């Protein structure tokens, strides 16, 4: 009898562990401890779990003709002291400088672990020429699309932004599937974007360098109809000098952003949803509404999204405005230039010293992340 009772208690204990090991938990579980407190994702970088974080491998430049190529290399993405580092390096350090204007880089790969992930914009193979240089920078972009997706939740990220001219760090989210069509019809949630420049100002003297960061929602029926100007906010602080907590609280009726506990942006499109909020019918009469069959006012932000972390460099879509003033020398390329990568590289003597590659293992130019947690809403 005693043995049978012990066996029954053991079964109940194992069942309790099972029911309390993943969210949502059974009613008898402790709701004050993870994951029963709603915590559905936690990353504190005990190691670099490449089953959880998949590297993107591409030269496509994020659709913005950025100057970096993304690869899976521990020179560019690594974990140390419970911190993720994404650090830029020079392509010439790998292939030699002459390769930029005459060599070929092939990222197609021969196994699932090293296959090219983005063929758009000549992303899997390129050959440099005298005018069209190969991507002069190597960096990293990682994502959870194959391991973790969620709908509605509170995301908290503790991170420090990089220092260095023309660096473009981002922590953001994209939909697992494009339920409403191609970007931006299915949405994008940018938790934080910044720029690495020490002193980058517009014509009114407003800083847009590493003491500024922005949070943004992208949404619209198709490119270039994008309603993001109505859902973006830039704030200022010492984001590249210390770690800060960035939060997006994504609910069924609103999306709110916070920095260190202070609300910076709240988006509620109203009962008529993002179509009316964006006034697209007025701006482009006759266009189709990709969200018309959804009754949810938060559409397209009513589907599963995944996490992305990356460090880009440059680009020609205007994130680095041609008219802004940079204290360390003028922007070395124009957004309309057909030779932008070449122009950028040939100004290396101006921007590369700001990355401080010989100081602190070059980590002043790295995007650093200590933790990421997601709670279900």
Image (cartoon, helix red, strand yellow):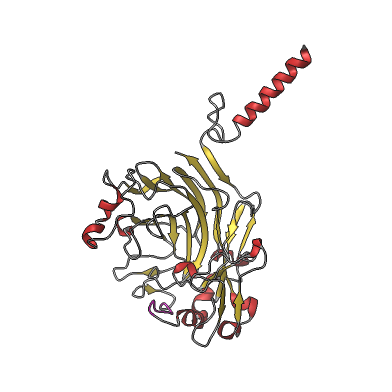
Residue sticking out furthest to the top: 1
Q: State the image coordinates of residue 352 (x, y, percent, origin top left).
A: 53, 75
Residue at position x 39%, y 42% in the image: 251
Left or right: residue 220 versus residue 314 is left
Counting the numbered discs, the total is 0
Q: Which residue is drawn at 40% across and 48% down?
A: 258
Image quadrant for the C terminus?
Answer: top left
Quadrant assignment, res 194: bottom left
Most common secondary structure along the magenta stretch: loop
In x, y percent, where is residue 163?
Answer: 50, 65
Q: Is residue 30 magenta?
A: no
- Residue 322 placement, left or right of 197: left
Residue drawn at 69 percent across, 24 percent down: 11
On-image quarter of the N terminus: top right
Name the residue located 45 percent from the left edge and 68 percent from the top edge: 63
Magenta extent = 331-336
Residue 110 seen from this side: yes
Q: Where is residue 209 in the image (x, y as percent from the top left)?
A: 41, 65
Residue 122's place in the image compared with 372, above or below, is below
Image x and y of residue 167, in percent: 48, 68
Residue 243 visible from this viewpoint: no
Question: Considering depth in this image, is 369 or 284 the residue closer to the camera?
Answer: 284
Compared with residue 315, is residue 144 higher up or lower down, i.e. above or below?
Answer: above
Q: Is residue 14 left or right of residue 229?
A: right
**Residue 205, picture quadrant:** bottom left
Which residue is more in the foreground, 167 or 9?
Answer: 9
């Amino acid at each position: 009898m005693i043995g049978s009772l012990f066996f029954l208690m053991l079964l109940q204990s194992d069942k309790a562990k099972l029911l309390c090991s993943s969210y949502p938990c059974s009613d008898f579980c402790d709701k004050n401890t993870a994951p029963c407190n709603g915590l559905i994702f936690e990353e504190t970088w005990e190691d670099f779990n490449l089953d959880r974080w998949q590297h993107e491998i591409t030269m496509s430049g994020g659709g913005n003709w950025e100057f970096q190529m993304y690869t899976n290399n521990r020179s560019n993405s690594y974990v140390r002291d419970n911190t993720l580092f994404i650090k830029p390096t020079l392509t010439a350090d790998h292939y030699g400088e002459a390769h930029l204007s005459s060599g070929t880089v092939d990222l197609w790969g021969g196994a699932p672990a090293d296959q090219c992930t983005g063929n758009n914009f000549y992303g899997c193979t390129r050959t440099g020429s005298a005018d069209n240089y190969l991507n002069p920078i190597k960096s990293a972009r990682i994502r959870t699309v194959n391991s973790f997706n969620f709908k509605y939740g509170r995301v908290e990220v503790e991170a420090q932004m990089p220092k260095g001219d023309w660096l473009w760090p981002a922590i953001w989210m994209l939909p697992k599937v494009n339920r409403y069509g191609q970007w931006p019809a299915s949405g994008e949630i940018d938790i934080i974007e910044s720029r690495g420049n020490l002193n980058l100002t517009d014509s009114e003297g407003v800083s847009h360098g590493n003491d500024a960061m922005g949070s943004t929602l992208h949404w619209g029926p198709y490119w270039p109809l994008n309603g993001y100007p109505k859902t973006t906010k830039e704030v200022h602080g010492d984001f590249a000098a210390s770690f800060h907590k960035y939060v997006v609280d994504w609910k069924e009726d609103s999306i709110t952003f916070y920095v260190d506990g202070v609300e910076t942006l709240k988006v509620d499109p109203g009962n008529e949803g993002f179509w009316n909020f964006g006034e697209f019918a007025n701006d482009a009469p006759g266009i189709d509404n990709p969200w018309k069959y959804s009754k949810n006012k938060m559409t397209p932000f009513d589907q599963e999204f995944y996490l992305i972390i990356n460090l880009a460099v440059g680009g020609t879509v205007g994130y680095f405005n041609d008219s802004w003033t940079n204290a360390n020398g003028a922007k070395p390329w124009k957004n309309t230039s057909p030779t932008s990568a070449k122009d950028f590289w040939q100004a290396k003597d101006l921007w590369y010293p700001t990355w401080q590659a010989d100081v602190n293992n070059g980590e002043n130019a790295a995007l650093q992340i200590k933790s990421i947690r997601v709670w279900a809403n």
